[in-house]
Amino acid sequence: MSEQEEDFATMFAASVAARRFERGQTIEGTIVALGPEVALVSVGGKSEAQIDIAELKDEDGDVEVSIGDRIQAVVVSTSGGIVLSRKGVRNAATQRELEDAFRAGLAVEGKVESVNKGGYEVRIARARAFCPLSQIDIVRTAEPAVHVGKTYTFRIIEYKDGGKSVVVSRRKHLEEEQQASADAVRASIVAGAVLTGRVVSVRDFGAFVDLGGGIQGLLHVSEMSWARVATPGEVVAAGDQITVKVLRVDEGTGKISLGLKQLQDDPWSTVGTTYQAGQVRTGRVTRIADFGAFVELEPGITGLMPVSEAGLDRDADLAKAFPIGSELEVAVLEADTSGRRIRLSRKAVAQQREQAELREYAARPDATPATPLGSLADKLRDALKGH
């Protein structure tokens, strides 16, 4: 066989192999050669495809694959051979490439340049496209301007007038990714699992967190922090990426309960050693009830001061005496770590001070040692009245 015949046979074999695949098809292959500009990928049998070496480099410009590695890529051309792309059709340089991407349903990469009342202007290489406000994300964007300057992956949902009218959707691309990952995400959501998710909405009672694949869980306000949280907005905001722990999964309803504070140190774990009976602490009043006042001693640690320990007259108004947010000194009566309860007393603080004053008075050189304690108290009160 002559050299010309061999070249023709090689070209014919490549053409036959190319007809096995369709443009836009996702295939898997093995890297068999790495050149300075392209890499060869074995895609089954004796068929080989090529891919631009630039698509196999990381952010630092280093080739991130080796010979023998398997990769997934999209067929972008079957003319004269098989050409692959791991990016679909990105950084499209011509309107023809955009049209091919539209017809093949491939993803394109574009930069959001500006926003107006109707949507966003997106630049895809040298072409301009329009993305409606509702198509920029899966969830409603409270501040549309946050997307300006960002580079996203889009799907072309409309291509008209030879490329003069190009409409794109990031939402469609996100939904497709979401659907593809839903099964894997569901398998990972079990009680005790620690997952990363995105806050999609914040309500009065808590926040809904997207765990991937369109699956959402509820982070109740009571599970956000060991400290008392007045409103969920104090801790999280829509769009935040947070790490949460799965507390419960209701198999019947599919509802998922999440926790944030469970990934933080529990302040109650050290209460037994840091709070001892008789200690005087300064706290902040957080709530008033008929039976007493709740006093926050530190974030996550709140004790109860019963009405009987407030040191007030029986008919006194507890709420007026101790306004919410006011600070006061209290003595620890009891600290129960297992029950997560601390009993406090303002009256005991006054008693401790009086006893200290009595001891100080008794230690004075002019004090009579044999004088009963009650008489000492009377003398102390008389002495204080005289000042």
Image (tube, rainbow, N blue to C red):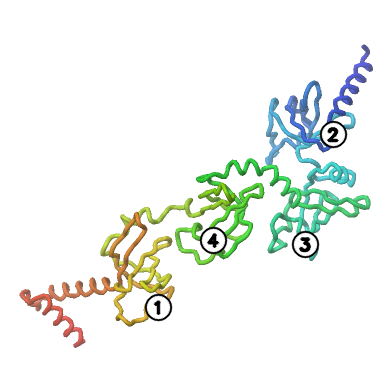
Q: Which mark is residue 115?
A: 3
Q: Amino acid at mark 3?
A: Val
Indicate which label's residue lies in the foreground, 4 or 1. 1
Mark 2 burial class by Cα count in 10 Å: few <14, some 14-19, many 20+: some
CA gap between label 3 and label 4 equals 29 Å
Q: Residues within 10 Å of mark 3 (few under 14, many from 20)?
A: some
User: Which residue sits at x=48%, y=58%?
Assistant: 225
* Residue 234 appears left or right of 16: left
Mark 2 and mark 1: Cα distance apart in space: 76 Å
Q: Amino acid at mark 1?
A: Ala
Q: Which mark lies nearer to you, 2 or 3?
A: 2
Point out which mark residue 22 bears.
Answer: 2
Amino acid type of the residue tagged 4 in the rendering: Val
Residues under labels 1 and 3: Cα distance?
51 Å
Cα separation between marks 2 and 3: 37 Å
Q: Return the x and y of residue 132 as percentages of the image width and height.
A: 79, 58
Left or right: where does residue 18 sit relative to residue 218?
right
